[in-house]
Amino acid sequence: MNEITKSLLGMVSNWTGSFKGAYNIRENGSCVGRMSSEHIRIESKTDKPGLDIHILPETIGETVSIPACVTHGNVDDLVYNDFYVGAGSDIVIVAGCGVHTETGEPARHNGIHRFYLETGAHVKYVEKHIGTGKGNGLKSIDPVTEIYLAPGAVLEMDSAQIGGVDRTLRKTKAVVEAGAKLLIRERILTEKEQGAETEFQVELNGEGAGADIVSRSVAREKSRQTYTSTIIGNAPCTGHSECDAIIDGEAIVDAAPKLCAHHSDAELIHEAAIGKIAGEQILKLRTLGLSEQEAEAKIIEGFLS
C-alpha cells in the first residue's frame, strides 16, 4: 500500500502498522491486504466489487476491519460489503473511509454495507470518514447502510465525518424485529462550502423492538446540512430520534424528523435543536485564558465527542 493509504488508515481506523483480528484493506478499488481468522471469513464477491464477511455463531470479542482509501483524483470507487453475523456473536466492525486528492480531479468512495444479524447477535459498528489533500478536486463519500436485525439482536452504530469531505449523501435503512435494538450515534462537521445530507429510515416490526438515533453536527462558514429521519412503528415498540446542530457563520441546516405510528402501542419521540454557540459558554472559557477562537474550538470538540 502507498504512504497516503497508511496515513488515512491511521485517521479512520486506528491503524498503527497492523490490525488486530480479521481485516481487508481497500486502496483505489483494489485489495492490498487481507486476513481472515478462525471465526471470521472474508471472501471476495464473484458478481460485483466487494466482500462477503461471515461471522460464525458465538464469536465473542473479535474485531473485523474493512477500511477503504482513495489516494488520488479521478477515482470513483464503488464497493458492496455484506456482513452475516451468526447467532449469539458479540463483535466489533470497523469500516473507515478516507479520500485524498492533490489535483483538480474528483475523488469519491461509495460503500454499500449490509448487515444481517441473527438472533441474539451484538455488533458495534464504527465508521469514520475524512477527506484530505490540497487539491481542489471534489472529495465525496456516499455511504449506504442497510441493517436487518433478527429477534433479540443489537447493533450499535458510531458514525463520524471528521472533516475535509466536500459532498456526502449518507443513507441508512434498518428493519428491526421483536426485542431487537438499534442504537445510532452520528457526528458531522462541515466547513467552507461543503454539503452533507443524512437520511435515516427505520421500521420497528416486532414487540419490544427499539431504535435510538442521535445526530450531532456542526455547520461552519457557508456549508449546508440536511437531516431527515423516519421511524415507523408497526408493533408495540419504542423509537427516539434526536438532531442537534450548531451553526456558525452563514451555514444552513435543515432538519426534518418524521414519526409514523402504525400500532396503538408504538411509543415514538423526536427532538430537534438548531442554533449557534451560546455566548455564555464562550465567556466562561475565555475567563480561563482561552481566546475566542480557542473557546469555540473547545466547545465544538466537546459537542462532537
Image: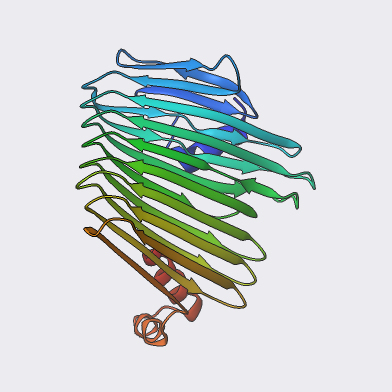
Residue 174 position in % (x across, y down): 39, 43
Q: Is residue 302 left or right of residue 32?
A: left
| Residue 107 lies in quadrant | top right
Locate residue 298 relative to residue 253 in the image: left or right: left
Q: Residue at x 60, y 28 (%)?
A: 27
Drawn side of residue 246 relative to residue 240, left or right = right
**Residue 88, placed above or below residue 187:** above
Quarter location, residue 231? bottom left
Is the residue 180 above or below the residue 211 in the image? Answer: above
Foreground: 223 or 89? 89
Reply above or below: 23 against 234. Answer: above
Which quadrant of the rendered structure holds the C terminus?
bottom left
Q: How many numbered badges does the structure rendering display?
A: 0
Return the x and y of residue 211 as percentages of the image width and height. Answer: 30, 52
Say how the picture is coloured: rainbow
| Residue at figure coordinates x 52%, y 56% from the top left | 198
Question: Where residue 197 sits: x, y (%)?
Answer: 56, 57
Q: Residue at x 19, y 47 (%)?
A: 208
Q: Residue furthest right?
A: 104
Quadrant of the snapshot with the N terminus: top right
Q: Position of residue 9 (x, y in %)?
A: 50, 36
Residue at the (24%, 25%) spot, across then down = 87
* Residue 181 in view, yes or no: yes
**Is residue 133 something that shows in the picture?**
no
Q: Toward the viewer: 59 or 115?
A: 115
